[in-house]
Amino acid sequence: MDVTLICVGKLKERYFKDACGEYIKRLGAFCRVNVVELGEERKDADPSPALVEAALLREAAAIMRAVPKGAALIALCVEGREMSSEKLAGKLSELMQSSSRLCLVIGGSDGLHESVKAAASLRLSMSPMTFPHHLARVMVLEQLYRAFSILNNGKYHK
C-alpha cells in the first residue's frame, strides 16, 4: 500500500517534524508513506474573496498534479464527514479494495478549492473545531497509524 499525504504549507517547527517523523516511521510496518509539501500561494494581508479564490485555484492545480495516478483521494475539509477511528479504518479498507494507493490532502490556511473536494472519494473532517494545518498533518498521520493498527488487530488502538 502506498499512501501519499499532500500538504499545502511547509513544516517549520521541529516538534511538528518530529511528531510526523515518528508516525511515518510507525506506518512503515503497514505501508509506504510519501509526504508532498506544496507552497502556499502568497496573498495580501487582507485579500478579497476573488484573490483567495484565485490562490486556491492555483493551489488546486498543483495538488492535482501531485496526486498519484489511480489513487483514492481523501480531502480533509471542515465540511467533510466526521467519523470514529474504527469507521475511518473501515472506510480506508473499502478504498484499498479498489486501489493500492491512497492520497490524503490537507489544504493551507484558506482550505481547499472546491475542485479538489469534488475529485475526492471522501471528504473527511477531523472535528468541527479548527486546527492549524501543521497540527492537522500530525493528527492525520496518527489516525492513519491508528486505522492501520485497527485493520491489523494491533494493540495501539486499545
Image (cartoon, rainbow, N blue to C red):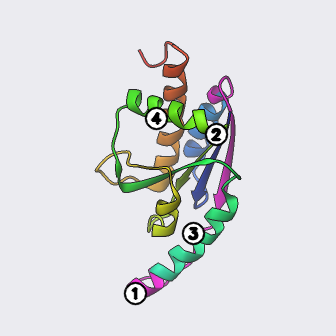
Residue 47 is a magenta residue: yes
Q: Are marks 2 and 4 in contact (CB under 8 Å)?
A: no
Bounds of the magenta segment: 26-52
> For residue 11, which quarter of the picture?
bottom right
Is 23 on the left or on the right of 158, as rendered? right
Q: Nearer the viewer, residue 4 or 93?
A: 93
Q: Which mark is residue 99?
A: 2
Q: Nearer the viewer, residue 122 or 127?
A: 122
Residue depth check, mark 1 versus mark 4: number of the one nearer the observer: 4
Q: Are marks 1 and 4 in contact (CB under 8 Å)?
A: no
Q: Amino acid at mark 2?
A: Ser
**Pointer 3: what residue?**
60
**Pointer 1: what residue?**
48
Compared with residue 1, is residue 49 higher up or lower down, i.e. above or below? below
In primary-sequence order, the first of circles 2 and 3 is 3
Is 88 on the left or on the right of 141, as rendered? left
